[in-house]
Structures are given as structure tokens and as C-alpha cells.
Image (cartoon, rainbow, N blue to C red):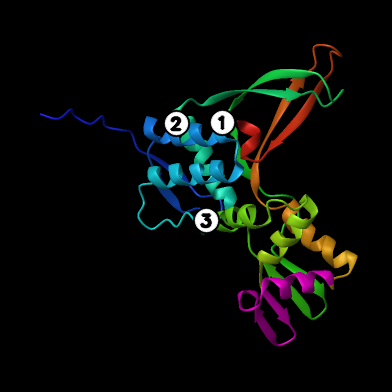
């Protein structure tokens, strides 16, 4: 007679981007091993793929497409998975903002971490009076592909490729251009032709895009000063 399987609890969670409810279970030892092995390699793409595989295994809905999911949705799911699987609190070492050198340990309650949208955020960018660009959020498959293809580029060069790949639809007067119908190089050329002001509007889209965010208060034991620190992105909580 084979050994019985241990029943796992099920939880519900709303996706920040759509408010769609998903059903998930905690990750198991076999899935945590995937992440630990990837972390040992130190390879960012391997870690991202491990996170994807764990989320995919733990989501019980049949209609969820992980590859085309907005990256902040995936990170939010994984953070909640971690809270239910390992523990709702995590100990972090952070640098005190007041002197930029003293390291202190803080405790973060993961359920308090939310996806926050920046002030004035919009995905519809008015480039001119008759030209409007609609943007889409970075998807999991896009981010992993960019890491593989452009991983050796500088952060500035990488941001240009990200902007190009996140352009969805261009409206010019009565004309509508599906950016998926145009090559990556065409989109890069389009970016090169923008004015500084137009480019900054596009940058503002990314700066204010939804992201995991949580503010903590820090007490510097050396200076005795208290200050606030904002943690952003999944990497800040591990």
C-alpha cells in the first residue's frame, strides 16, 4: 500500500491588474527546491523561471496564462505564495537612508505589501495633438526573453528595448497602427525620433507603473535618527 498524500490548504487572491480571483495552494518542498537550486546558480533568468514554474504549479485555475501575465501580477502572487508557504514575516537587512551606510535588520509583514500605482499614471501617452501612444505593461515572457537576448547591455540600452516592446498601439489622426505588426528595429527608430519631452512622458509611464511597494520606518542606532524607506519590487523582500 502506497503512502497517503498530505492535503494542502487552498487560498484565494485577487490579481491587481484585473481584480480576477485566483485559487492557489502553498508551494511544496519539491517546488521550493527549484527556487533554491536557481538561487545557488546566481543566474537571474534561472531564478525568474523558477518563480514562474512555482507559480504555475500552485495556481489551481485552469485559465491563467503565466507567460502573458503582467510581471507585477506574477510577483504579487509569488509574494503571497511565499507568505502562505514559509511564513508571513521576513527579516531583511537594509541601509539607513540618513547616513547611507549603517545596516539594520527589519521585519516585514508580507500581507502588508501591496501593488501600488504611481500618481498620475496612465498607459495612454499624448505625444502630439494628433498622435497618441498606448502602452502595455511588461509581461513575464517579455522580461525573460529580454534578459536572454539583451542581458549584456547597459541599463539605459535595456530600457530602450523594454520601451519598444511595450508599445501596443499608435494612433495618428484617423490612422491606427498595431505595433505588433512592426519590427523591433522600427520601434527603436521611432523612439530615437522623439523629442526629450515626449521621451520623458514614456519614461513616466514606467516610473509610475504598478509595482510591489511597502514603506517601513527605520531607526538608525548610530545617529539615533528615524527615517522612512520605501521597498519596491519583489527582489526587495528577499
Q: Percent x, y for residue 234? A: 61, 39
Q: Locate the N terminus by quadrant.
A: top left
Do the residues bearing badges 1 and 2 touch, measured as CB atoms within 8 Å? no
Instruction: Determine whether the residue tagged by mark 2 lies in a helix, strand or loop.
Output: helix
**Image height check: is 30 above or below 107?**
below
Pick the front one: 191 or 24: 191
Q: Left or right? Give the position of 115 relative to 22.
A: right
Question: Based on the displayed image, in which of its 4 quarters is residue 178 positioned?
Answer: bottom right
Residue drawn 84% across the image and 13% down it? 224
Instruction: Tell me if residue 52 can be seen.
Output: yes
- Residue 128 is marked as none
Instruction: Tell which circle, 3 or 1, labels the residue nearer the N-terminal end.
Output: 3
Residue that carries the numbered disc 1 in the rendered image:
110
Residue under circle 3?
69
**Magenta stretch: includes residue 175:** yes
Residue 169 point in image, percent of width and height: 66, 74
Residue at (51, 59) in percent of width and height: 68
**Residue 166 visible here:** no
140 inside magenta stretch: no
From the image, state whether disc 3 or disc 1 is nearer to you: 3
- Tell me the CA gap for discs 3 and 1: 21 Å
Tell me where residue 21 appears, x and y as whole percent. 43, 50
Amino acid at each position: 500500500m502506497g503512502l497517503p498524500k498530505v492535503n494542502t490548504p487552498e487560498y484565494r487572491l485577487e490579481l491587481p491588474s484585473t481584480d480576477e480571483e485566483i485559487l492557489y495552494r502553498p508551494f511544496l518542498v519539491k517546488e521550493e527546491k527549484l527556487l533554491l537550486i536557481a538561487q545557488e546558480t546566481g543566474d537571474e533568468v534561472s531564478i525568474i523561471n523558477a518563480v514562474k514554474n512555482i507559480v504555475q504549479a500552485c495556481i489551481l485555475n485552469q485559465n491563467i496564462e503565466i507567460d502573458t501575465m503582467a510581471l507585477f501580477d506574477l510577483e504579487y502572487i509569488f509574494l503571497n505564495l511565499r507568505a502562505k508557504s514559509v511564513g508571513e514575516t521576513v527579516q531583511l537587512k537594509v541601509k539607513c537612508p540618513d547616513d547611507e551606510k549603517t545596516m539594520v535588520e527589519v521585519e516585514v509583514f508580507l500581507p502588508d505589501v501591496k501593488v501600488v500605482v504611481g500618481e498620475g499614471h496612465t498607459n495612454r501617452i499624448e505625444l502630439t495633438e494628433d498622435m497618441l501612444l498606448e502602452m502595455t505593461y511588461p509581461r513575464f515572457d517579455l522580461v525573460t526573453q529580454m534578459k536572454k537576448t539583451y542581458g549584456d547591455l547597459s541599463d539605459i540600452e535595456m530600457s530602450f528595448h523594454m520601451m519598444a516592446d511595450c508599445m501596443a498601439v499608435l494612433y495618428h489622426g484617423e490612422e491606427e497602427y498595431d505595433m505588433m505588426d512592426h519590427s523591433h528595429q522600427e520601434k527603436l527608430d521611432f523612439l530615437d525620433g522623439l523629442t526629450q519631452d515626449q521621451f520623458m512622458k514614456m519614461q513616466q509611464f514606467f516610473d509610475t507603473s504598478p509595482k510591489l511597494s511597502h514603506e517601513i520606518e527605520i531607526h538608525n542606532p548610530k545617529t539615533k535618527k528615524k527615517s522612512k524607506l520605501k521597498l519596491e519590487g519583489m527582489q526587495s523582500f528577499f
